[in-house]
Amino acid sequence: MRRTFCLVMILGSSALHAQTPAFEVASIKPSQTIGKPTMSAAKGGRINATNVTLKYLILWAWDLRPYQISDGPTWLDSAAFDIIATPEHPMDPSPDNIEISRQMMRGLLADRFQLAVRLEQKELPRYALIHAANGPALKAVEKWQNPTDMRVRGGSPGHLAGEKVTMTLLTQLLSDITGRQVVDKTSLTGYYDFKLDWTPDDAQPDPASPSIFTALQEQLGLKLQSEKGPVRVLTIERAEKPAAN
């Protein structure tokens, strides 16, 4: 039997508090760019986003995967925007400050997109990342000195190479690949380099290339174990296109 846990929050523009970190200035315009969406943090924590949809921004602001979002306007994943947003108080654009940046983005979406959402915890199928029988085969390395030292490269479908990454980042990548939430139960708290090669589900089967599940065990000494557990689910209750400025 599926269980739905208690309501966590409803966020609208009226729910923001004065002490919440915020963007001092934000420019939002319909995008004329063709190509993939991009978003980066510049000096002082300024966010530069090009050709991004509201869905893209919600996924980033709440650290969600697509399967965790429901409802929303018809233009949620089609109307694209260019955004430049400058924080009230400058900060280093590092992984240590990413939650502050996410909070500011949530506030910006509530203010400019009139976004209101409902967050819930639902009991759903997910994967636990655990040690395989022979134990982890990751290469432990020193923590990054500069945030840009933590890198993940894809190159082609079915290939990942990570440098100075945490298990938190690896589980996020595996969530994207499997389409199901992955929770870290490895107790590995360091920074690691890795290479992973597998056959994507939508690719032509290749006997010489393993599935993501087999590749994890053979190449990284880790295992995805099916289980049920609480998964965050975000329901969009209201959203409007922002006025261009």
Image: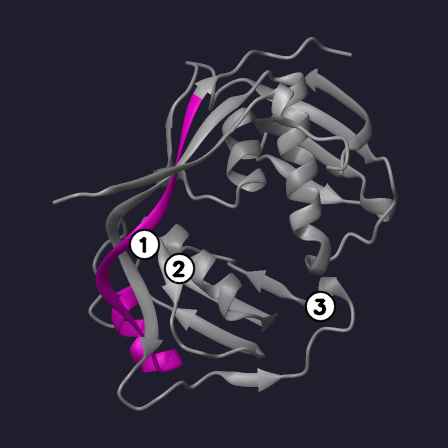
- Residue beneath the point at 17% across and 43% down: 2
Check disc 3 and report its element: helix, strand or loop: helix
Mark 1 → mark 3, Cα distance in angstroms: 26 Å
Q: Would you say 204 lies left or right of 8 here? A: left
Q: Report whether 133 appears left or right of 11.
A: left
- Pick whichever of labels 1 and 3 is earlier in the sequence: 3
Q: Position of residue 127 (x, y in %)?
A: 29, 61
Q: Which mark is residue 97?
A: none
Residue 33 is at least partly visible in this image: no
Out of 175 and 159, give the one closest to the viewer. Answer: 175
Image quadrant assignment for residue 33: top right
Q: Is residue 221 left or right of residue 110?
A: left
User: Mark 3 vs mark 2: which is more N-terminal?
Assistant: 3
Magenta residues span: 210-236
In the rendered image, the residue lying farthest to the left is: 1
Please give the residue where the numbered disc 3 appears in the rendered image: 149
Residues under numbered marks 2 and 1 in contact, where contact means CB atoms less than 8 Å apart: yes
- For the residue marked with disc 3, what is the amino acid? Asp
The residue that appears at 69% across and 33% down in the rendered structure is 49
Residue at horizontal 24%, vertical 48%? 124
Q: Amino acid at mark 2?
A: Leu
Q: Which residue is mark 2?
A: 174
Q: Residue furthest top?
A: 243
Which label number is shown at residue 178?
1
Q: Secondary structure at mark 1?
A: helix
- What kind of element bears circle 2? helix
Q: In the rendered image of this protein, does residue 160 appear above or below residue 125?
A: below
- Visible residue check, residue 58: yes
